Image (tube, helix red, strand yellow):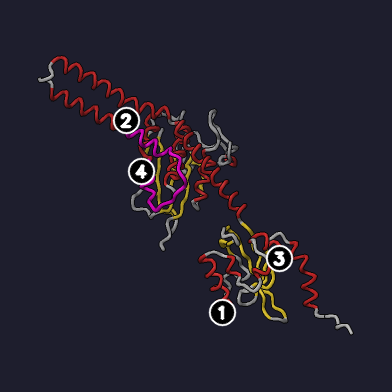
Amino acid sequence: MSEPRSTNSETEGAVRLDPVIDAMIESMIVIDENGVMERVNKATQKMFGYMPDELLGKNISMLMVGSDRSRHDDYMHRYKQTGVRRIIGIGRDVLALRKDGSNFPANIAVGEVNGPEGRRFVGLVRDLTDQRELEEQALRRREEMVNVSRLSTMGEMAAAMAHELNQPLTAIANYGAACIRLLEHDPIGNQEDIREALQEITDQAHRAGEVIRRTRSFTRSTDSEREETTLSKVAAQIRSLAELDTKANNIRLNWDIPEELLPILVDPIQIQQVILNLIRNAVDAMRDTAPDERIIDVSAKLTGPHELRLEVRDRGIGVDESAAPEIFNAFYTTKSTGMGMGLAICRTIILAHGGTLRFRKNDKRPGDTGSTFFFTIPTKVSN
């Protein structure tokens, strides 16, 4: 006599679901209340390199690395005791471990299922390797564009830099020639004059070297590294470069960045790039401004409990209304030789630092001209 056919709907449901589960492209793992794996699909076998019998009956934490393993067990235990969700129904990123010992970034989302046999949890695991690679590629491309934009800014300032370097080099040549004449005429009697001339040569060489050092520091290509500093320190390091440009264009640069502003966590070179780019644009905007009105004001202040704002105000031609909606877009430029990337890169940098970059017309007072570009940046939150 044959055995009666099972009518257990749960068992039949599980059989019917198996092909569906195995057809999923993402790993699916069913675990009990203690995190022990009861069912895995084919995607799990492919992702982790295990056969089913190597996983079933084992704790799911064996598929995680280091601290992720212990935290997962803690989260499960805490949820059973308190009902507080730290991973159930939420999900989190972990470092997953393959059978061959290699690891990869993954996202694990865990859902809860209550049935006749008690509480079960269903975990969906997604391999984030490709996503992380795309993110890294995007970051590298952004860094490359930031560096190109930085070099472009310095290229626009080349004339001012050449002028600044030419002065000490000319002085060195003149003092050197004077030393030769003094030595030929009366080396003993002219020792004091020769000593003064040599000191001038040394000073002028240091002056030229400082221009080169500042330029190399600003244009060097580096990975983005953030550090705790102040806006005053960051801006002070490129003030002399900005003054090269403004002085060469007969513009007065007013600088008002208080030292006592709250600290910030930034990549100093990138923030310097934004400031210098805004000053460079202000210089270009005042090509036709009257000599006594050629002034740029750079100022900074605390605008909220956790926010600083730096402004660059010019007295130039201002921003045309038709250009306003596009001014921060990539490849948009009003310069005949511009790349159209300066403001777009600046906005990208500021957004990456958690701030905003905007501008406004200087029309608060009658006869006021020009524009004010400004960015906000969060202050460092104390631990």
Marks 1 and 4 sit apart, C-alpha to C-alpha, by 53 Å
Dots 2, 4 in contact, CB < 8 A: no
Direction front: furthest residue: 1
Question: Where, by quadrant of the figure, is residue 165 drawn?
Answer: top left
Seen from the viewer's position, the closer of residues 375 and 176 is 176
Amino acid, disc 1: Thr
Q: Amino acid at mark 2?
A: Ala
| Earlier residue among tags 3 and 4 | 3
Q: Position of residue 78 (x, y in %)?
A: 55, 76
What's drawn in magenta, residue-wise?
209-237
Question: How far apart in space, not on screen, are marks 3 and 4 (Cα)?
Answer: 60 Å
Disc 2 to disc 4, C-alpha distance: 19 Å
Question: Helix, strand or loop at disc 4?
Answer: helix
Is residue 219 highlighted in magenta?
yes
Residue on which disc 4 sits:
236
State left or right for residue 164 relative to residue 352. left
| Image coords of residue 9 (percent x, y) | 80, 78
Q: Earlier in the sequence, mark 1 or mark 4?
A: 1
Residue at 37% x, 53% y is 261
Name the residue that disc number 2 marks.
208
Q: Nearer the viewer, residue 30 or 234?
A: 30
Q: Which residue is mark 3?
A: 41
At label 2, counting other C-alpha atoms closer than 10 Å, the crowd grade (few under 14, some 14-19, many 20 or more) is some
Q: Residue at x 59, y 79 (%)?
A: 80
Q: Residues within 10 Å of mark 1 (few under 14, many from 20)?
A: few
Residue 153, compared with residue 190, is above or below; it is below
* Contact flag, marks 1 and 4 (Cβ < 8 Å): no
Q: Earlier in the sequence, mark 1 or mark 2?
A: 1
Along the viewing direction, whichever of 189 and 65 lies nearer the viewer: 65
Q: Secondary structure at mark 2?
A: helix
